[in-house]
Image (cartoon, rainbow, N blue to C red):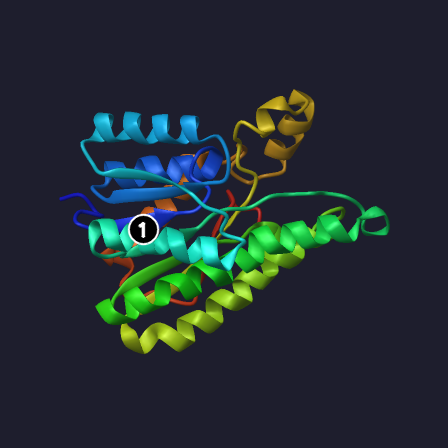
Amino acid sequence: MALLAQKVALITGGTRGIGKGIVERFLEEGADVAFTYVSSPEKANAQAEELGTRTGRKVMAIQSDAGDMISAQAAVDQVVNTWGKLDILVNNAGITKDQLLMRMSEADWDAVINTNLKSVFNMTKAVMRTMLKQRNGSIINMSSVVGVQGNAGQANYAASKAGVLGFTKSVAQELGSRNIRCNAIAPGFIETEMTASLDPKVVEGWREGIPLKRGGTPADVANACVFLGSDLSGYITGQTLNVCGGMLT
């Protein structure tokens, strides 16, 4: 039996990279999936149609800015009103605006915190009423190894992803009595469309510094999300799963 059969999931930032990988794996495991995007509705809707045809599952693309509370609530409401419930929320939307702190602008700090951290607050608040009524749910927040150990030139990103970890632990404690679980995933170096444009020598150097000697794939992160979204992880909450090839050991 598929691990996510009869479950409904909402994934923020689902049109590329890790988010797209999660959408595809959830569908393969039997879930009906809605995903959000900010721009390019033609591309997002075409993606939803293609995935629905290929998997035979229900797929919905929703234009929504998770960093905006009203927009976040509207996305959740659209899923619940259409499919009647919402079992899994994956807070995946994120951006980077890297710069040494001395040169980092306030605008770049605010943009990263808003997209990476405030969005997690917004979406979790938006889904709470539904999950509390169901007395069931799994919230999965995307952090990063950078949120655990920091990284020069990424003070804004590290702060946002560290904030996600503290938020995750607090939500797990608040909602556990209602059978709502909240966990985080901390990916390491994941190879996506963005990393494909980097100098191959730089990428190879990163790979060599990883105990498993390779970069991760979106599927590696998606598989962890399947586990945390499924009933297999029914006694796991408030935890951080490092999907990093051994970078954090």
Look at the image and tell me in which quarter the N terminus lies. Answer: top left
The percent coordinates of residue 58 (x first, y second) are: 22, 38
Which residue is drawn at the image coordinates 39% and 64% (left, top)? 182
Label 1 sits on residue? 78
The percent coordinates of residue 116 (x first, y second) are: 57, 52
Determine which quarter of the picture holds residue 46: top left
Instruction: Report the amino acid beneath label 1.
Output: Gln
Please say if 87 is above or below 18: below
Determine which quarter of the picture holds residue 74: bottom left
Q: Can residue 149 be seen in this view?
A: no
Q: Is residue 139 visible?
A: yes
Which residue is drawn at the image coordinates 72% and 53% (left, top)? 109
Which residue is drawn at the image coordinates 81% and 51% (left, top)? 101
Could you tell me how many numbered marks the image carries? 1
Please say if 180 is above or below 58: below
Which residue is drawn at the image coordinates 29% and 41% (left, top)? 26
Label 1 element class? helix
- Extreme residue in the right direction: 102
Q: In this view, does 14 lie to the left or right of 97?
A: left
Along the line of sight, the residue nearer the viewer: 89 or 225: 89
Along the line of sight, the residue nearer the viewer: 26 or 241: 26
The percent coordinates of residue 241 (x first, y second) are: 45, 55
Please say if 212 is above or below 126: above
Q: How crowded is mark 1: few (under 14 residues within 10 Å), some or many (20 or more)?
A: some
